[in-house]
Image: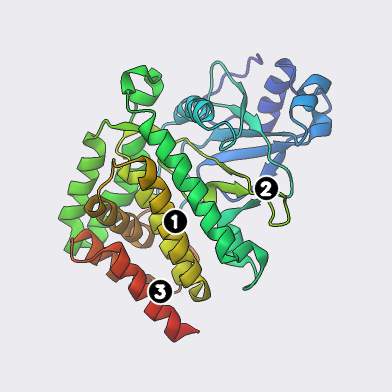
């Protein structure tokens, strides 16, 4: 290992030295920065820069991640970079349960939180960007494809939750730490409670509920932005769930709510997709409930409302909604958090709004 004494996030040059020392990358290799994330430095290594035996096992190259101590958000948001160790272990655990649903962990730095995973084919795409940017009527946005994706993800998530309930069998790093508080409940629930006092006390209660639970292994960032999906012309639909740095033993309600909230935001952003995304939302829930009864309807609704509110008024806010759309989403979120509405009613309101927009 290189003797560079990490105090925080390593530089690309330092990471490259370590990968050369680990006999993963040739001395002439390069790290290409990837963009889009707020919590990590991410680089891609081309297959041609890998050592021959590594290239044979990773024909699409490798991806390297190093967590940031201060996240790239308008408001100050700091978190312990040791979460990178938890992410590596969590991906390995998820990979044992569903090998085709996550990238394979190739290497972990023994002393600092630098993680190397297999890269997806270059033709794979970020599912969030597909939903936000693909042309209406394109195969990427076909209703059947959206539902198939949601079914796959609901089935995958249920498998993770149900089969990790024996928490004493999980690695210690996943059973400890404050990732949930620093990366979710403080910047999401408690920050939003200060901004939206009418639901503030309930958001505080929901945060405590999440922090008190010790039910199963929770991904913590189960969102379309963390899904890479094969192109529509591929023979088989394939998808990976990425970014497990918030993984912890906790409440499965967080994962189902996180995903549900993001689908709702996408439907508001693209009204023409409200119908297909509602069907996808139902497919996700049906697939999840086919295996798991860990989250009842009331908690699913309320926690989804909390995440919706947080994406509008918390530290990490969605960037693709208009001011009018934000007002609409926040109103629906308040109804859900207050127990005065259901997700079915929220989606009915999304559909009515879409009808007036198209």
**Image height of 149 relative to 65, above or below:** below
Cα–Cα span, label 1 and label 2: 19 Å
Cα–Cα span, label 2 and label 3: 35 Å
Mark 1 lies on a secondary structure that is helix
266 vs 185, left or right, is right
Which image quarter holds the N terminus? top right
* Residue placed under numbered mark 3 in the picture: 325
Cα–Cα span, label 1 and label 3: 25 Å
Determine crowd level at label 3: few under 14, some 14-19, many 20+ residues with C-alpha closer than 10 A: some
Q: Which of marks 1 and 3 is nearer the N terminus?
A: 1
- In the rendered view, how is the structure colored? rainbow
Residue appearing at x 52%, y 29% in the figure:
8
- Provide residue 104's location: percent of width, then percent of height: 61, 29
Nearer the observer, 142 or 265 = 142
Label for residue 283? 1
Contact flag, marks 1 and 3 (Cβ < 8 Å) = no
Label for residue 226? none
Q: Is residue 246 visible?
A: no
Q: Is residue 283 visible?
A: yes
Mark 3 lies on a secondary structure that is helix
* Tag nearer the camera, 2 or 3: 2
229 vs 48, left or right, is left
Q: Earlier in the sequence, mark 1 or mark 2?
A: 2
Q: How many marks?
A: 3
Residue appearing at x 40%, y 48% in the figure:
76
**Image height of 344 relative to 109, above or below:** below
């Amino acid at each position: 290992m290189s003797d560079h004494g990490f105090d925080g996030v390593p530089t690309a040059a330092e990471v490259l030295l370590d990968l050369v020392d680990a006999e993963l990358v040739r001395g002439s290799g390069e790290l290409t920065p990837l963009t889009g994330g707020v919590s990590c430095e991410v680089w891609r290594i081309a297959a041609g820069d890998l050592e021959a035996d590594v290239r044979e096992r990773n024909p699409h190259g490798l991806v390297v991640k190093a967590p940031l101590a201060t996240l790239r958000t308008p408001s100050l948001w700091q978190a312990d970079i040791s979460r990178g160790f938890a992410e590596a272990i969590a991906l390995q655990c998820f990979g044992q349960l569903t090998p085709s649903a996550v990238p394979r962990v190739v290497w972990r730095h023994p002393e600092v939180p630098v993680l190397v995973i297999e890269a997806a084919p270059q033709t794979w795409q970020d599912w969030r960007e597909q939903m936000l940017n693909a042309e209406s009527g394109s195969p990427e946005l076909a209703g059947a494809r959206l539902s198939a994706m949601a079914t796959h993800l609901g089935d995958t998530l249920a498998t993770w939750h149900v089969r990790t309930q024996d928490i004493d069998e999980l690695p210690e790093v996943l059973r400890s730490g404050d990732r949930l508080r620093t990366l979710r409940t403080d910047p999401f629930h408690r920050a939003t409670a200060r901004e939206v006092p009418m639901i503030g006390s309930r958001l505080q209660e929901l945060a405590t509920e999440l922090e008190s639970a010790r039910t199963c292994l929770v991904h913590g960032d189960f969102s379309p932005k963390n899904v890479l999906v094969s192109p529509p012309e591929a023979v088989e639909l394939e998808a990976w769930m990425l970014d497990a740095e918030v993984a912890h033993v906790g409440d499965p309600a967080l994962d189902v709510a996180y995903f549900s909230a993001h689908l709702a935001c996408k439907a508001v952003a693209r009204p023409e997709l409200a119908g297909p995304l509602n069907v996808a939302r139902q497919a996700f829930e049906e697939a999840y409930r086919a295996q798991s009864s860990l989250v009842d309807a009331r908690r699913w609704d309320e926690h989804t409302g909390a995440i919706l509110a947080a994406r509008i008024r918390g530290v990490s806010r969605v960037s693709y909604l208009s001011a009018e759309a934000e007002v609409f989403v926040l109103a629906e979120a308040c109804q859900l958090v207050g127990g005065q509405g259901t997700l079915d009613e929220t989606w009915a309101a999304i559909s009515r709004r879409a009808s007036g927009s198209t």
